[in-house]
Image (tube, helix red, strand yellow):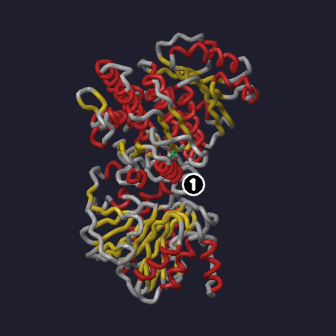
């Protein structure tokens, strides 16, 4: 949550800061701001709302405190896009926050800000905002006597929590200082200047070369040089990395929304993500040490994640239990981390996270490690905090996912669950290599089936036109279809703002069915052969009470036409492979419903892509 950027170079920085911030807006969009040096003074422009709505008009007309509209002398600055934690979204609570001597942008949470504030109040400081960040500014100011690094070291020794900070000090008008703990921060090395950013996609327009800042490391960034120091001021040598994907991956490429683009990328990413994990027709995780012997040493499996990642975990549990016959616990990270879980050194904890930064998932991973368990992170963002903290990392290779609403990352997370489940099933001797190869071949057919689903979208658009005026609706399913119902329901409510719940179809009559009145939409997912008849009975129960049923099922399935109002057909695959097929119509129905309702599809209200607070 929150995105930070910075640039110091030989040319103007203001446009660079704003353009880079736009690429980080998925991390939060409650407010945005920049601070730049102008003739040695720090000038800020910041405003509530999205970048184009608040910050850009403000910068163009010159912000109140003499922010010049001639950007040519502004060559060093920092920027921030906010997801509010402490203090409501407002101009005053926006970052950068400064006092003329020191100015900072912050991603994270300062847990002991109350004590620090108390101390600073006693020292004569006053506060304007409700943010935790302002305490860091004032503490830096308190310790700053002309040596920025010394002040940073002293402040970092006192503050507790998660942070990535970009800092400007008056008197050092071509220099950005940066430091981090927990929250991500990269330092970009460019031709005409250097950068900081919360992620590399923000600055890819300008450079592909970057350093990963680690906890307690300080970066001192000049236009032509970058120095890294540890907390004892000792210089650190760091590896220069290069991004291996193209900037086009982070652009809309002709689609109206990133979400639609990312839905369309699914056939190609599903194919490419699995291809690097299959050797000789079998899943292969040897590059990160998940060998058959290691798999066989585990007696239990835990899968932990948040939101869609956790939904992918539910599919994983079902696959692992039904194929490998191993006990699997799947849980929401924010619950599991406080539930005193029964996990020990004989177990494997799989954490799933697209961003690799989700605070609760990271905490769950750390807890599993403390309990002695082995940890495997299924992560998309290379070098992310979770990836670095885990014993083993299975990179999803799904490319950047910009839309806040997860689509391709979810599909690839589910795909990774298949590969893990097949590997475990094979290692535990529950299938032969030949059978495993057959499964892999079936998996390899899925990208083509998904491609087919994307050819004609009229059914999804029609379904959306029937849902757009609903106030509340239900998704139902059984078994794997229930797992998909959860994901479909989350997608819809997240971007269309229609209240929606998912329910196990058989559980409805134990209470929830009372919500059904004339024309309540019920979206029923029925793809699992052994359960279809049971689900159809449940559909009839809601239909008899006036519900308007949208049925998502296999094309070949014969179902009494009276049982539903609208039907969306899916191509045929073996039962266990239906989740990857089913998720696509669910994504598109949510997408078109949101478009019809005119919501901000890629940046739904109150949300952020990377949830770095618990
Ligand atoms: C829903 C969605 C979220 C994320 C969740 C976990 O569309 O995107 O539910 O799945 O916030 O995020 P990661 O995978 O980054 O840990």
Q: Position of residue 167 (x, y in %)?
A: 44, 75
Q: Quadrant of residue 7?
A: bottom left
Q: Is residue 569 placed above or below 269 in the rendered structure?
A: above
Q: Is residue 196 placed above or below 444 in the rendered structure?
A: below
* Nearest the eye: 242 or 602: 242
* Nearest the eye: 601 or 578: 578
Q: Quadrant of residue 524?
A: top right
Dot 1: what SS? loop
* Residue that appears at 35% across and 22% down: 439
Q: Position of residue 128 (x, y in %)?
A: 63, 77
Q: Decide if residue 609 is in sight here.
A: no
Q: Position of residue 199 (x, y in %)?
A: 39, 58
* Residue that appears at 42% across and 38% down: 413
* Residue that appears at 37% across and 34% down: 295
* Residue that appears at 53% across and 85% down: 142
Q: Is residue 357 left or right of residue 606?
A: left
Q: Decide if residue 63 is in sight here.
A: yes
């Amino acid at each position: 949550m929150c995105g930070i950027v910075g640039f110091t170079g030989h040319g103007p920085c203001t446009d660079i800061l704003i353009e880079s911030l736009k690429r980080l807006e998925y991390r939060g969009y409650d407010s945005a701001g920049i601070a730049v040096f102008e003739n040695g003074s720090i000038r800020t422009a910041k405003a509530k709302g999205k970048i184009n709505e608040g910050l850009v008009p403000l910068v163009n007309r010159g912000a109140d405190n003499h922010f010049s509209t001639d950007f040519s002398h502004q060559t060093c600055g920092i920027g921030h896009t906010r997801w509010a934690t402490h203090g409501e979204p407002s101009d005053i609570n926006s970052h950068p926050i400064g006092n003329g001597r020191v100015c900072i942008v912050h991603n994270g949470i300062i847990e002991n800000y109350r004590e620090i504030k108390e101390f600073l109040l006693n020292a004569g400081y006053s506060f304007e905002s409700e943010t935790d960040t302002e305490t860091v500014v004032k503490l830096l100011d308190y310790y700053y006597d002309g040596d920025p690094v010394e002040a940073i070291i002293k402040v970092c020794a006192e503050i507790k929590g998660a942070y990535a900070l970009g800092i400007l000090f008056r008197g050092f008008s071509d220099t950005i200082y940066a430091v981090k703990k927990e929250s991500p921060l990269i330092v970009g090395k460019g031709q005409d200047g250097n950068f900081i950013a919360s992620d590399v996609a923000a600055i890819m327009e300008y450079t592909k070369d970057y350093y990963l800042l680690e906890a307690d490391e300080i970066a001192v960034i000049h236009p032509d040089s970058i120095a890294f120091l540890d907390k004892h001021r000792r210089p650190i040598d760091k590896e220069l990395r290069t991004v291996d994907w193209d900037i086009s991956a982070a652009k809309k490429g002709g689609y109206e929304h990133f979400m639609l683009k990312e839905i369309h990328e699914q056939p190609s990413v599903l194919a490419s993500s699995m291809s690097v994990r299959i050797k000789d027709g079998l899943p292969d995780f040897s590059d990160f040490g998940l060998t058959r012997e290691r798999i066989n040493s585990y007696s239990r499996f835990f899968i932990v994640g948040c939101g869609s990642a956790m939904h992918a975990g539910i599919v994983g549990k079902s696959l692992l239990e039904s194929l490998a016959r191993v006990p699997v616990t799947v849980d929401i990270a924010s619950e599991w981390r406080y539930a005193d879980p029964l996990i020990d050194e004989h177990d494997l904890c799989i954490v799933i996270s697209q961003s690799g930064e989700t605070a609760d998932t990271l905490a769950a991973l750390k807890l599993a490690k403390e309990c002695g368990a082995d940890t495997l992170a299924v992560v998309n963002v290379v070098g992310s905090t979770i990836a670095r903290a885990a014993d083993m990392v299975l990179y999803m290779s799904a490319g950047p996912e910009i839309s806040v609403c997860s689509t391709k990352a979810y599909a690839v997370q589910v795909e990774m669950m298949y590969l893990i489940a097949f590997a475990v099933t094979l290692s535990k001797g529950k299938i032969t290599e030949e059978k495993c190869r057959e499964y892999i071949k079936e998996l390899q057919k899925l990208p083509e089936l998904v491609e087919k689903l994307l050819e004609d979208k009229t059914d999804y658009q029609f379904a959306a036109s029937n849902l757009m005026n609903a106030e509340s609706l239900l998704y139902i399913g059984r078994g794997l279809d229930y797992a998909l119902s959860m994901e479909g329901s989350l997608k819809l409510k997240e971007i269309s703002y229609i209240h929606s719940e998912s329910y196990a179809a058989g559980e409805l009559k134990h209470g929830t069915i009372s919500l059904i009145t004339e024309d309540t939409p019920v979206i029923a997912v029925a793809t699992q052969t052994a359960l279809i008849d049971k689900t159809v009975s449940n559909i009839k129960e809601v239909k008899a009470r006036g519900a308007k049923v949208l049925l998502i099922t296999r094309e070949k399935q014969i179902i009494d036409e009276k049982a539903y109002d609208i039907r969306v057909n899916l191509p045929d695959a073996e039962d266990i492979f239906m989740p990857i097929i089913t998720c696509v119509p669910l994504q598109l129905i949510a997408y078109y419903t949101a478009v019809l309702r005119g919501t901000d599809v890629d940046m739904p209200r109150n949300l952020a892509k990377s949830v770095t607070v618990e």
